[in-house]
Every structure is written in structure tokens, then in C-alpha cells.
Image (tube, rainbow, N blue to C red):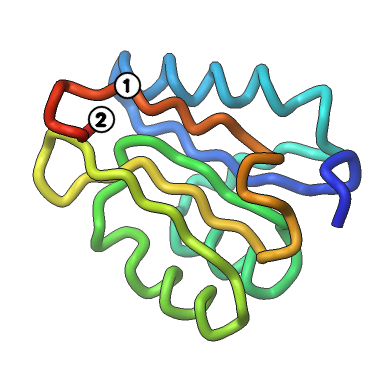
Amino acid sequence: TQLAEAIVGIGFFKNEETIRRSLKDFQHLVGRVRKMRLMGAAALDAVYVAAGRFDAYIEYGIKLWDICAGELILGCAGGKTQKIPAAEPHTFAIKMWNGNLPLTDFTPLEVATTGTGRL
């Protein structure tokens, strides 16, 4: 998959900081990919990547229990996941992709740390 042909899912967790980061990724991607999609369910987004309906999925402020089943399914399908821990327990910035897009291709996934190596 080339980036210009990619369909990317994006999630927006409802707090000011995660919305700001998600909008930054959206602005970075919207003119570079074929389509952007907002489904509203992290597990559904992950399974869509696993099934080949999406090429990638990104979200900030996602809880571990919202993505663990989808991450397992995606891994079994050959997809990849990058999780960056947030300052809040059990919370992550997540990037999931089908394995065909280079990690650095589809989003910067801004890493703003608190000095602890966490978002």
C-alpha cells in the first residue's frame, strides 16, 4: 500500500489535549491519504485494519481495555501496533497498521513527554 492509497481510521478521545494532538495528525494526513475515517470504536478500527478495510488507525488517550482484543486480532493477521504510555494509568497513544506502510509514513504520532517518557 502506498500512502496516497491508504484509508486511515482516527479516533478522538474527548479532552482538550488529545483532541489537539489528533487534529494535528488529521491535518498532517488528510491531504496525503486516500480517505480518513472516524468510526468511534477502537476495537472496530483495529479489526478493520486486520481485515484490510483500513490501512492504519491512530488515537490518543485510548484505554488498554478498549484496544487489547483488537490488537490481538490485528497481530494474528500480520499487522503491527505501536503504543506509547500516557501519564494516566492504562492509557496510551496508539498507532496500528497493516504492516505494509512504513511506520514513519502515515503519521508523526507526536510524542510530547512529561519528562518520564510518557505522553
50 versus 38 height, above or below: below
Task: Specify the quadrant that holds the N terminus.
Answer: bottom right
Q: How many labels does the image show?
A: 2
Q: Badge 2: how crowded within 10 Å, few (<14), some, or many (20+)? A: many
Q: Is residue 84 left or right of residue 95?
A: left
The amino acid on which the numbered mark 1 sits, given as a three-letter code, is Ala
Pick the front one: 98 or 15: 98
Q: Badge 1: how crowded within 10 Å, few (<14), some, or many (20+)? A: few
Q: In this view, does 110 lie to the left or right of 101?
A: left
Q: Is mark 1 on a helix, strand or loop?
A: loop
Residue 34 location (% of width, % of height): 87, 39
Residue located farthest toward the bottom when viewing the structure as drawn: 76
Pick the front one: 103 or 76: 103
6 versus 21 height, above or below: below
Q: Is residue 16 left or right of residue 75?
A: left
- Residue depicted at 24% across the width and 62% down the height: 65
As drawn, the label of residue 112 is 1
Closer to the chain start, of discs 1 and 2, is 1
16 versus 87 height, above or below: above
- Residue depicted at 53% across the width and 85% down the height: 76
Residue 55 location (% of width, % of height): 72, 56
Mark 1 to mark 2 CA distance (whole Å): 5 Å
Pick the front one: 33 or 44: 33
Quadrant in the rendering for residue 111: top left
Q: Do the residues labelled 1 and 2 touch (CB within 8 Å)?
A: yes
Q: In this view, does 14 lie to the left or right of 59?
A: left
The amino acid on which the numbered mark 2 sits, given as a three-letter code, is Leu
Residue holding disc 2: 119
- Residue depicted at 30% across the width and 37% down the height: 61
- Residue depicted at 24% across the width and 44% down the height: 85
Task: Specify the quadrant that holds the C terminus.
Answer: top left
